[in-house]
Image: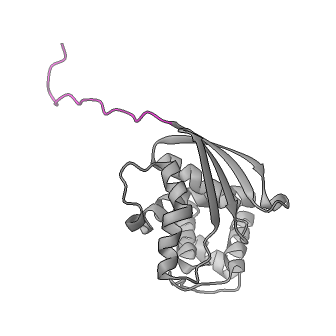
Amino acid sequence: MYGMIFDFLREYVEERHGGRETWNALLKANHKEYKIYFPSIEYPDREIVALAVTAANTLRLPLSAVLEDFGAFLATRLLSFYHMYINNDRWRSFEVIENAGGCIHHAINRHNPNRKPPKLITNRDAEGLMLLQYQSHRKLCHVVKGIVRGLGDHFHEKITITETQCMLDGADSCIMHLERQEISRPTKKSRQPVGEAVN
C-alpha cells in the first residue's frame, strides 16, 4: 500500500476522530512512536490494516464501519489527487468508477508499473444501474463501498449498494449492484437587502 493512502488515513483520523493526538495514539499502539509516510513509497499492507483495526477498537466501532467511513472520506481526496486523469466535466460517479478500472489505472501504471491497483470490472444495462466487480488481494471491499458512496455525495447522487457475493465470505471477487438517483441540489434563497420594507 502506497504512503499516499496512509497519509489520507492520517487526515481522516485527525479530521473526524480527535486530531493529531488520536493519530499519535494509533501509531504508539502499533509500536511506532513517530512515523511519516511518503506518498510514492510502498509500505506493507498489514501496517494500514493494523492501524484501521486499532482505530476501530479505540472508537468501539465495527471495523467494517470504520473502513467504509474512511472510503467515503477518501473519495474526494482521490478525485483531487488523480484530477489529471478525470478531465471530463460530464463524468459523475458511475463514469469515474468505469474509468478507474480502465484508463485511470492504465495511465497510473504507465508511470509506475509496480503498482498493484485493484481489478474493477463494470457493466451498465441502464443509465442508473451498474454492476461492479471488485477483486484485490487486499480484500478492502468495505473501503470500495465507502468510495462509491463518497462519489455519490460529491456528485449529489444517492447510490444504493447491494452486494451479492464477497471475498470476505470466500468468493473470488465481490459483486456489487449499484443504483443511483440524482439528488436535487438546494436552491439559494434570494436575500432581501437589509432595511428594505416588507410589503
Q: Residue 184: within the magenta?
A: yes
Residue 179: x percent and y percent?
Answer: 61, 40
Q: How is the image coloured?
A: one colour
Residue 117 point in image, percent of width and height: 60, 72
Pick the front one: 170 or 76: 170
Q: Nearer the viewer, residue 54 or 119?
A: 119
Q: Is residue 121 above or below residue 184?
A: below
Residue at the far top in the pictured view: 199
Seen in the image, is 34 located left or right of residue 93?
right
View extreme (right): residue: 170
| Residue 60 in sight here | no
Which residue is painted at 73% across and 66% down in the image? 139
Q: Which residue corresponds to the image point at 71% horizontal and 73% vertical from the top-left? A: 49
Image quarter of residue 21: bottom right
Nearest the eye: 16 or 47: 47
Q: Is residue 177 left or right of residue 4?
A: right
Q: Which residues are magenta?
A: 182-199
Q: Is residue 72 left or right of residue 182?
A: right
Q: Position of residue 55 (x, y in %)?
A: 68, 67
Q: Report the label total.
A: 0
In the picture, the quarter occupied by the N terminus is bottom right
Is residue 127 rendered to the left or right of residue 199? right
For the stretch drawn in magenta, the main secondary structure is: loop
Name the residue at 53% across, 69% down: 105
Question: Where's the C terminus, which quadrant?
Answer: top left
Placement of 46 over or under 148, stated as above or below: below
* Residue 144 seen from this side: yes
Based on the picture, tell me whether residue 20 belongs to the magenta stretch. Answer: no
Whether 41 is drawn above or below 192: the answer is below
- Residue 134 appears at what percent x and percent y? 68, 60
